[in-house]
Image (tube, coloured by chain):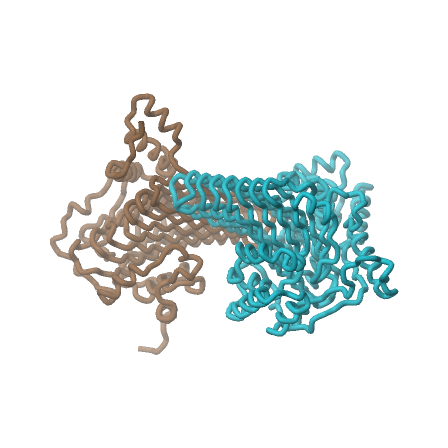
Amino acid sequence: MSAQLTPLAELRATADGLWQSNGLPSPKLEAWKHTNLRALQRVESKTGGTVATEIPSEFDAKIAAPLDGFAGTLLLVDGKLNLALSVIPDGLTVVDLADAAPEQLGTIAKLDRLQDGLTARNLAQFDRGVALSVTGHDVGAIELRYVQSSEDAAMATQESRLLIELARHAELTVVERHIGAGQFVNNHVTEVDLSAGAVLKHVRVQHQDTRSFHLGKIAVRQGRDSRYESHVAQFGAAIGRCDIEVFLAEPGASCKLDGLYHGQGNQHIDNHSVIHHIANNTTSSELYKGILDDKSTGIFRGNILIYKGASGCATTQMNRNLVLSEQATVHTKPQLEIDNDDVTAAHGATVGQLDDDALFYLRSRGIDAQTAHSMLVFAFAGEVVADVPVESIQTLLKDELARRLAARTGLTVEG
Amino acid sequence: MSPSATATTLPTEPVTPAVTETEATIAEFTARGYDAGFVTDISTDTAPPGLREDTVRFISAKKNEPEWLLEYRLRAYRHFLTLAEPDWAHLNYDPIDLQDITFYSAPKLKEIKNIDDLTPEERADYDELIKTYEKLGVPLHERSKLSGVAVDAVFDSVSVVTTFKEQLGKVGVIFCPLSEAVENHPELVKQYLGSVVPHTDNYFSALNAAVFSDGSFVYIPKGVRCPMELSTYFRINAAKSGQFERTLIIAEEGSYVSYLEGCTAPMRDENQLHAAVVELIAMDDASIKYSTVQNWYPGDENGVGGIYNFVTKRGACRGKRSKISWTQVETGSAITWKYPSCILQGDDSVGEFYSVALSNNRQQADTGTKMVHIGANTRSTIVSKGISAGHGQQTYRGQVKMLKGAKGARNYTQCDSLLMGDTAIADTVPYIEVNNSSAQVEHEASTSKINDDQLFYLMQRGLSAEDAVNLIVNGFCKDVFRELPMEFAVEAQKLLEVSLEGAVG
C-alpha cells in the first residue's frame, strides 16, 4: 500500500472535511432561505446517521415488474443495486458503486461550488448506487426503481449516487422512480457527463413516503451540441428538494428543464436550478409548474447565468404556480445574471388560482364542481406531462395526479 | 455601431459622410460630459471629519435640536455601532471609511431676511449660491418661469431656500426644511419620524438616523390637493463630505401631493457618500406621487470618483384606498443601492414603482422595489427598465410579498433590461412570496441588446447612430417617462442622452 491517494480518494477526504465544517445547510444560506432542515436533523440525530439495512433475500419479484416501453429496469433497494431482480439491456454498461467507484465521480458536482455540506457528505460517505454508460447507439429507455426494503425498518439515511456517462452521439432515456415507503432520508447525488452530440432524457418521479426526506442533487456537464432534457415530478416526501446544475460547457449544447410539483398536507417541495451558459450559442429553456394545496409550501428558484464572451445564447424560464388553499405558500425567484449583450433572455413567474370563469363555464355545462376543478388542474399540469418521454410514465403521472386530486379535502362547492 | 466597430468588421468600406458625422456627434457629446460637475466657492461651517458620538451631538447642537431628537439620534448611533455593512448586493466598491467623511457642512450664510443687510462677504456667498442654482436650472425666485413648482434647495447639510412657503401655508400645506419642522411642528415630526423606516431597519438607515441633516418636511392636511408641485433640489458641494438628508411626507385623509427630487454633485476624484432616508405616509384616500431624477456625479469613464448612493425610501399606505407612486430615473452615481418600497397596509391601497436605471462606463446599480401586501385587495405595479452600457452593471432586485390577510391582492411586474456592449452586465433577481390563495402575481422580464434591425432601419432613414440609439432607448423607457411630471420628463430624456454618450456600439 502506497500512501498515494487516488484523485477520487483525495476528493472524498476533502469532501469529508467540508461536511465536518459546513454541516447541514442553514436557512442563512440564500439557496436554503425557505427550506429548514431542522426536522431532518432531529430525525437523523435519533438514529445516529447512516444505518445500512439488509436486503431481504425473498424480495417480491412483483415490485420489479417492468413498465411498458422500457428496454430495461434496475431495481435499487435502499439505494443498493439488486442485480437478481434487474434487467439490463444490451449496450448499457452498469457498474455497481458498492463494488467499484469510477474516478469520474465528484468531478461534475464540484465541491468548490458548494455552500452546503449535503453534497459533500454524499461524496464522502456514499456506498451505494450505480454508474451507467452508453458508448453505442440509442439503447432506449431504462428505469431505475428506488424502493425500501421494509417500511418498518429503523430510520435510515442513504447516501446514494448515480453517474450517467454518454459517449459521442449516444442516446439514452433514464427514468428514476423514487417510491420508497417508510421514514428515511434519501440523499441522492446524480452526475451526468454528455459527450459531443449525446442526448439524455432524464425523468425523475419523486414519490417517496410523506414521512421521508428526498434531497436530490443533479449536476450535468454538456459537450458540444449535446442535449439534456430533465423532467422532475415531485409528489412525495415531507421535504422534497431537487437541485439541478447544468454546465453548458461547449458551443451548441442545449438543455431543457421541466418540472411539476404537487404539495398536499404539510409537504415542503423545493426545486432549485442553475444553468451556466459558458460557451457560445448554447440554449436553455425551463418550465416549472407547481400546484400547492392544504398547508404545503412550494419553492422555485431558477438561476440562469450567461457568461462574459458567451455570445448567441438564448434562454427562457417560466415558473407558474396554482394555489388551491388558503394556507398554502409559494416562494418563487426566477433569476437572470447576464454578462453579455448578444443574448435573448426572458423569464417570468406567476402565482394564481383557478380561473373562476372557466370553473363557471364547466359547471354551466353540467359538470360537477369536483370534476371541473380536477379538469382545470389537469389542464394546468398537462403542458408539462405531455413532454415526458415515455408514454407509460405520462400515464403514471396523470394517474397519480388524479388520485391525489380525488383525495383532496376541503373542496368548497359553490352555489 | 460605433465608427471603430464598423471599421474593424468591414475594413473595405469607405468612410461615408454619415460616419464622419457620427464621429463628430460623439466627440461633441463626450466633450459635454457631466455639466453639473462644477464647484461653488463659498465659506462653510464644517464638522471635523469622522463619526463619533461627538459628531452626532455636534450636528444636533448646530441645529438647536430638542432633547428628544438628540436622544433619538444617539439611540440610532448606538444601534448603528452594532451593525455590519450589508454585502448581499451585486456591487463592488472599496470599503467606505466613515472616519474620513465630514458629516456636516453648511454654508455660513444663514437664512436671508434682507439682502441689503448682508456684509460684502455674505453678499458674495449669496451671489455664488444663487448662481449655482441658476446654472443647475433650479428656480429660486418665486417669479421665475417655472413658478408652478415650489422648491426646497438643500446645499450640503442644510436647506438654503424654500420658496412659496407662504402661498402654500394659506391652504394649510406645510413645506419646509425638516429642521424648521422640528422647531415649529415638533408634534408631527415626533409622531412620524422613523415610523416607516425605523432606525433599526438597516445599516444605512441607522447611520442616517444618527447624523441626518436637512431634508424636506411636507404635511398636506385633510382634503387638500396641494396646489403646486413640491420639489427638493439636493446639491453636494463640499469635498470629502457626505450628505445624509431625511425627507418626511405626510398626506392626511383625502389629500394629494406630487413631490419631485433632483440631485447633482461636483466632479471629484474621490467618492462621496450619500445615505438618505425618505418616509411617506398616506392616510385614507390620500395619494402621494414621488418622482426622482437622480444625477449625482457618476465618476469618470475609468470609474474614478462618483457618488455612493445608498438610499432607503419607503412609503406606508396606512389608509384605505391610499396610493403611493414612486417614479425614478437613475442616471448618476457610481454606486446606486436603492429600493423604494410600499407597505400596503390599508385595504384597497395601491403601490406603484416606475424606474429607469442607467449604468454606463463603470457605474453599478442594484435597485428595485419591495411591495408588501398586507391589506385586502391591495394592488401593485412594478415597471423597471434597466440599461447597461460599457462596463456598467445593473441589478434589478425586487420583492413582492403577499401576506395572509391580503385577500384578492394583485401584483404585476415587468422588468426589462437593455444591454449595450459585451462587457455590460444585467441581472434580475425577483423574490415572490405568496401566503394566500386569492392573490395573483405576475412577473415578466426580458433581457436583450438593441435590435440591429431597428438600428439599421433608423440609420437608413438618415439618423446618426447616436440619434438612432437615443430614439430606441427613449422608446424603451417610455412607460416610465410617461409617469413623470412634464418638466422632469424632458430633463430625464436629456439626461439619458448625455449619460449614454460614447456608449453606442
Task: State the image quarter where residue A15 is shown.
Answer: bottom left
Q: Is residue A84 left or right of residue B431?
A: left
Which chain did the renderer colour cyan?
Answer: B
- The relative height of residue A95 versus residue A330 in the rendered view (above or below) is below
- The relative height of residue B265 versus residue B82 in the rendered view (above or below) is above
> Total number of numbered labels?
0
In depth, the one of B234 and A265 nearer the eye is B234
Q: Position of residue B340 (x, y in %)?
A: 57, 51
Q: Position of residue A146 (x, y in %)?
A: 25, 51
Instruction: Tell me, yes or no, if residue B202 can be seen here.
Output: yes
Q: Position of residue A233 (x, y in %)?
A: 33, 45
Task: State the image quarter where residue A2 is shown.
Answer: bottom left
Instruction: Tell me, yes or no, if residue B334 can be seen here.
Output: no
In depth, the one of A20 and A244 nearer the eye is A20
Farthest top residue?
Answer: A365
Which chain did the renderer colour brown?
Answer: A
Which quarter of the image is occupied by the N terminus of chain B? top right
Task: State the image quarter where residue B184 is shown.
Answer: bottom right
Residue at left 32%, top 39%?
Answer: A390
Q: Position of residue A115 (x, y in %)?
A: 42, 63
Residue at left 11%, top 53%?
Answer: A58
In depth, the one of B85 and B487 nearer the eye is B487
